[in-house]
Amino acid sequence: MNRILLNSLFVQTQGAYLRLQGDTVRVEVEGELRLQVPLHHLGSLVLFGNVLVSPHLLARCSEDGRSVVWLSEHGRFQGRMVGRVSGNVLLRRAQYQALDEEEKALALAQAFVQAKVRNARVVLLRAVREGGASEVLSQALREQEAVLSALPRANSLDEVRGLEGQAAAAYFQAFGEMLLVPGFAFAGRVKRPPRDPVNALLSFLYTLLVSDAVSALEGVGLDPQVGYLHALRPGKPALALDLVEEFRAWWADRLALTLLNRRQLGPKHFLERPGGVVYLTEDGRREVLVAYQKRKQEEVIHPLLREPVPVGLLPHLQARLLARYLRGDLPRYPGFVAR
C-alpha cells in the first residue's frame, strides 16, 4: 500500500523541462534547475500546458507503472500515459459482465448515487450548523431526503440517473448560500466552459479527483472506462466518474468553499478570457494544488474499516472494495459516506 500513498508532482511553469538524472527527477526552466525530487517519492506527474518531459523519464514512468497526466495550461484534462495493461483479466471480465447484468449494474449505480447524495447532505448540514437553516438550504435537504427514499425503488439506470440529477440540481441551487464572502456569486453549475470563478474552481478540483480515481481503478486492475452510472462513450472514464461521485461534495466542494470562505482565493486568482470563459491564474492553481495535497494527507475514519486512513487513499480503498464486489467477495458495494 505504500506505493499508492506516494505524491504527485504538479508542474505548471510554462517551458519547464523534466528529465531524469540517475533516479532523480530534475525540473529545469531555461536551463536552470528549479527542483529535484527522488523518483521513488513520486506516484505520478501532472503537467500543465507547455511542459516537456524527456523520453528517458517517460520510459521509466511507463516501466514503473507511474502515470503521467497532461492538462491544459488552465487545468483541463487532455491526456494520460500509463504503462502496459496490468491487473487480473478475470476481474476485468467480471467488470464487463456486470455491465450486462441489469440487476448488478443497477445496484452499483444506486450505491454511487446514494453515497453522493448522503455526502452532499453532510455538506449541507454543516452549512446549517454554521450559518443557520435558510429556506434554500432546507429545501435542498428535503430534496436529498426524497431522493434517498426513492433510490431503492428505482427500477432502471435511467431512473437512477434522473434521481441523481434531481439531487444535484437542488444541491447546486443551495451552493451559493454556503459562500460567505462578498465578490463571488454562484447561479448554478456550468461545466463547459466555466463562466464564473466558483465554477472554474469546481471544474479544476473535479479534474484532479478524476485523475486520482483513474489511477486508483487502474491500480486494482479495473478498466476506468467501463462504468455503470455514467453512460459509455469512447475516451470517457465512466467508472472513474462513477467513483468520483462519492467524493465530489465532501472532498472537492468542501475544499472549494474553504478556500473561498477563508479568502485563500480571491478575485485576483481568476482570469476571464474573451468569450466569458473563466480560469484560475497560475497563482490560483498553485494555492489549490497545495491545499489539495494537504487534504490528501489528512486522516479520516473509514466507515467500513473503522480505522484512520489518509483522504488521498480513499479512492484506492473504494476501488478495492468495488473489485471485491465484482469478484463476488462482497454481497454489495459499500459507497464511501463521510461521518
Image (cartoon, rainbow, N blue to C red):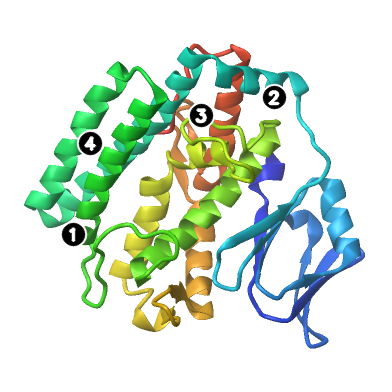
Assess whether mark 1 and mark 3 are in contact (beta carbons under 8 angstroms).
Answer: no
Q: In the picture shown, does residue 320 fall above or below 167? A: above
The Cα–Cα distance between marks 3 and 2, rounded to whole angstroms, is: 14 Å
Q: Nearer the viewer, mark 2 or mark 1?
A: 2
The kind of residue on which mark 3 rests is Tyr
Assess whether mark 4 and mark 1 are in contact (beta carbons under 8 angstroms).
Answer: no
Label 2: which residue?
A: 92
Say which quarter of the image contains residue 95: top right
Label 4: which residue?
A: 144
Q: Is there any visible trace of residue 297 in the rendered image?
A: no
Number of marks present in the image shown: 4
Closer to us: 7 or 112: 112
Q: Which mark is residue 228?
A: 3
Mark sitting earlier along the chain (3/1): 1
Mark sitting earlier along the chain (1/4): 4
The kind of residue on which mark 4 rests is Gln
Label 1: which residue?
A: 177
The kind of residue on which mark 2 rests is Arg
Q: Nearer the viewer, mark 4 or mark 3?
A: 3
Mark sitting earlier along the chain (4/3): 4
The Cα–Cα distance between marks 1 and 4, rounded to whole angstroms, is: 16 Å
Instruction: For mark 1, give the secondary structure.
Output: helix
* Residue drawn at point x = 56 percent, y = 22 percent: 99
Mark sitting earlier along the chain (2/1): 2
* Residue drawn at point x = 59 percent, y = 51 percent: 211
The kind of residue on which mark 1 rests is Glu
Instruction: For mark 3, give the secondary structure.
Output: loop
- Mark 3 Cα shell of 10 Å, populated few (<14), some (14-19), many (≥20): many
Q: Is residue 50 left or right of residue 98?
A: right
